[in-house]
Image (spheres, rainbow, N blue to C red):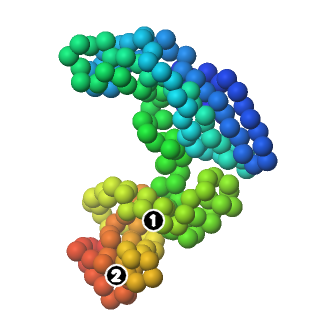
């Protein structure tokens, strides 16, 4: 159920209503400095960190991570103390696992803001607002298209809520934005509008 926890040990599980909290700690005796790459076993301190993950059935999941800080042993390194990196799927400072971020990106591009937020609520994936999903779709890197998209989705999003609206066009096959238009008017053309129209 947790393919991402190689190198992490489950130390506890708390279940309440539709929420699961899973306590994890690293099994590695040492960690590598993210700046110079040197290995260290000398622990400075510990702290708790919470990261949201994909749901189990209809239950929201949070990973309660016991994170260690280490002293960097390299005399010429600018980073004297660093936090261990637990797993590639749990990025530094992130509040969600990368696989949950991928799901939210797909939902944002497929269902838009309001529809995506409703879908996340119905599936109990996580608590997320329509504005957050629109931000996710805006931050999704655009890709170049060698051919005209066959199936597109169109949604509007608020640049200034209640005042200024724009339009996003998404290639539904690749789940990537095709165009961002300056407003929500039907007659508005984007820079490559002639390329995207059938």
Residue drawn 48% across the image and 21% down it: 45
- Residue 150 visible here: no
Tell me the residue that label 1 is attached to: 134
The image shows residue 50 at horizontal and vertical percentages of 56, 39
The image shows residue 197 at horizontal and vertical percentages of 33, 78
> How many numbered discs?
2
Relative placement, left or right, of 11 versus 160 is right
In front of the other: 43 or 53: 43
Q: Quadrant of residue 148?
A: bottom left
- Residue 31 visible here: yes
The image shows residue 94 at horizontal and vertical percentages of 46, 42
The Cα atoms of the two marked residues, 2 and 1, are separated by: 15 Å
Query: Does label 2 or label 1 sit earlier along the sequence?
Result: 1
Q: Is residue 112 above or below residue 124?
A: below
In front of the other: 77 or 144: 77
Q: Residue furthest left?
A: 76
Q: What is the crowding at mark 1: few (fewer than 14 residues within 10 Å), some, or many (at least 20)? A: many
For the residue labelled by badge 2, is the local secondary structure a helix, a strand or a loop?
loop
Q: Quadrant of residue 170?
A: bottom left
Tell me the residue that label 2 is attached to: 183
Disc 2 to disc 1: CB gap under 8 Å: no
Q: Residue furthest right?
A: 17
Q: Quadrant of residue 13?
A: top right
In front of the other: 48 or 111: 48
Residue 125: numbered disc: none
Q: Is residue 29 above or below residue 36?
A: above
Residue drawn 78% across the image and 43% down it: 16
């Amino acid at each position: 159920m947790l393919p991402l926890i190689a190198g992490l040990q489950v130390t506890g599980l708390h279940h309440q209503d539709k929420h699961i909290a899973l306590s994890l700690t690293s099994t590695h005796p040492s960690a590598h400095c993210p700046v110079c790459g040197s290995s260290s076993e000398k622990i400075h301190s510990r702290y708790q960190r919470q990261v949201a993950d994909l749901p189990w059935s209809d239950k929201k999941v949070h990973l309660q991570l016991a994170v260690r800080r280490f002293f960097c042993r390299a005399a010429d390194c600018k980073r004297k103390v660093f936090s261990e990196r637990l797993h590639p799927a749990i990025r530094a400072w992130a509040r969600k696992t990368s696989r949950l971020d991928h799901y939210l990106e797909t939902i944002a591009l497929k269902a838009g803001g309001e529809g995506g937020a409703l879908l996340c609520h119905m599936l109990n994936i996580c608590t997320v607002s329509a504005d957050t999903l629109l931000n996710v779709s805006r931050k999704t890197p655009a890709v170049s298209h060698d051919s005209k998209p066959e199936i597109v989705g169109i949604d509007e999003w608020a640049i200034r809520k209640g005042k200024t609206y724009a339009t996003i066009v998404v290639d539904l096959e690749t789940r990537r934005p095709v165009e961002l238009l300056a407003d929500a008017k039907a007659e508005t053309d984007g820079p490559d509008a002639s390329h995207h129209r059938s």
